[in-house]
Amino acid sequence: MIIGSCGWDAQHNGGCGRSIGYADGEDWNVYIVWTKLTGLDQGNPRHVVYTTVTDDGAGGFLIDPLPQVQFENGYRSGYTTLAYDSPNAVGYGTFHYSPASGDPWSAVAVIENPWVPNLFNMGTVPNPFANEHIWPHSVFGNTNHVHMTMHELRVGAADMMQITYYRFAPDPVTGVMTPAHDGDPHVITDMAMNISTDIAPNSTGEQLAAGIVMARFGTLGEVFGESDDTQWNNDMYVFQSPDAGVTWEEPIDVTQFIGPIYDALPDTNAANGDTMRVYTDVSVVYDDEDDLHVAFTAGVFDFFRVAAYYESRIFHWMLDDNGDDVWTQINYQPWVRQVEGWARTTDRPSLYFDDDTGILWCAMEVCDGGPDTTDFGESGIVNSDIFVTASPPGEYNGLLWTTPVNVTNTKWLDEGPAPVGECRAESDVSIALDSDGDYLHMTYLLDLDAGTGIGTAPEGEMTDNPIVYHRIAKQDLLDIFEANAEWQPNYPMHVDSTGFWQDPGNSQWAEYGGFFTGNREELSVGEGSGLQPNEFELKQNYPNPFNPSTSIEFSLARAGMVKLAVYNVLGQEIATLVDRRVNAGTHNVTFMADELPSGVYFYKLSADGNEKVRKMVLMK
């Protein structure tokens, strides 16, 4: 349902944080906040607003009769997130606030004050910097604190930002926002290039975790000078506080990407080290056992060519109470024709843990359709959709993820690009942290012209874009997951020096049974019992690098003529592995390279008008 509109189509410059809160009960209600521009001139006043959606008593919705209520009186406010006290159904909107004159600062306000109607009590965060102190992300904890992380505005494009922490304690009688922090905000790190943080409390509120995308300072500086550090050359760090934000422990480098190996030069493939980097988003949540879950986007990074590609994956990292950690893939989306700035082919994950069922959910943005998609606007930028996936309860929670389902599916199907006003590009998705009960509660912006329409170099035109509240029955999604019967293949966090993703194998759905609903017996998996593939797929060879043989797996949705061939770096065909009619299903072929020299080779699968190419390394 459309609950409002906004011409400011970049609700967040990176990670989205939370912008929706849900309170269950006989009369449930949902709060949603967003940034609203006055008119369609980006120089106009800009405000932060909210609305509520409530139960109509008959399974439907009632929207606030006065939607889009402004809860500050500034001139250029924006980039709001919501810290929501679900048990008391009180929302705290956090935002950066710009008066008619003077520099912006971060603030927090009680929205729809339950103690004094129509009064928005506001607390302001001290600014210890010469630069602006803005872009807050926030969460409410059970110690009765509103926790906030904020970002220092950097002056130059290559300057580092400082990221800070601050907290408020709302008065339970008056709603007055009292600072609960000694002195200036705590500087968590001064090594950030992106506006990408998220913060989460555990069940008691005492343990606090902040996920932060941190720049690999000086990495590029070793070759090109420190001014060339970039927004896509990052690691993912987790900072934890054992006492609700009073003190902070030493951070955990989650990704620990391997940097360039200079001794391997002039072979740039070998010298690249890891060819993956964290991009510009993060989502953090604790489960009911106080295990920490983090989701983030990682894209391809070619160090010696200083090249970054839009192709990306979303990874999940989990830290349990024993200090053990593990990485798993949530989603992978290959290259498409073009995505908007500050985006990748799949990104902006939003995690939610369901206390009732133990299921871990994740919503995300996805630009699908491949390089030949026709679902794009006049700017050439592909329209994105919202996808949802889930991880089952119990011992596999966070370790297995279903293949994501498109829950919006607003495709442009006519010829030519979608005209301005006809695009349907969903972005800035956020799931309510307390979506307990039968539904997921989400919000997102529906951009009517794909590409950011603001800034000095806008990609698309400014349009009056709907703000959407989307409620989905969880059981409907679980039914789809079980009908599709597919787990996501897992990929390693570290990519080898060939610069290509590796696939160590897929988890079989049948091996575990569709156990989202529990009480299922395990099903045996034997030869011929695999699920029928529903897409054309060429897997990464295994092992890779190899000597002298390797296995190549491919899948066909239907029978047809198939050719699988191997090529050298000059494009010359050196081996034909398959050239015949092949039945639908999954097939394995062994490639013997005992008579070939060491080096990089490519293998291509062609069938039914489709082609896929992968890279492999023979190392003798």
Image (cartoon, rainbow, N blue to C red):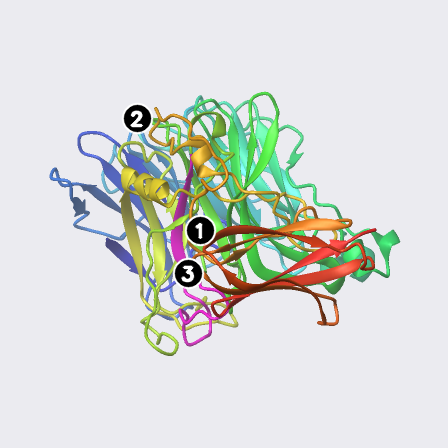
Q: CA distance from mark 2 to mark 1?
A: 59 Å
**Mark 1 or mark 3: whose residue is earlier in sequence:** 3
Q: Name the amino acid, label 1.
A: Pro
Mark 2 element type:
loop
Q: Which residue is mark 1?
A: 533
Residue under the image location 38 percent in, 36 percent down: 433
Decide if residue 205 is on the left or right side of residue 412.
right
Q: Which residue is mark 2?
A: 173
Q: State the mark number for residue 613.
A: none
Mark 1 element type:
loop
Decide if residue 2 is on the left or right side of residue 558.
left
**Mark 2 or mark 1: whose residue is earlier in sequence:** 2
Image quadrant in which you'd find residue 39: bottom left
Q: Nearer the viewer, residue 202 or 573?
A: 573
Residue under the image location 35 percent in, 76 percent down: 419
* Magenta region, residue range: 369-391
Residue located farthest toward the bottom when viewing the structure as drawn: 416
Q: Give the x, y percent position of residue 217.
A: 73, 49
Image quadrant in which you'd find residue 299: bottom right
Decide if residue 83 is on the left or right side of residue 489.
left
Mark 3 element type:
loop
Task: Tell me, yes or no, if residue 229 can be seen here.
Answer: no
Q: Which residue is mark 3?
A: 384
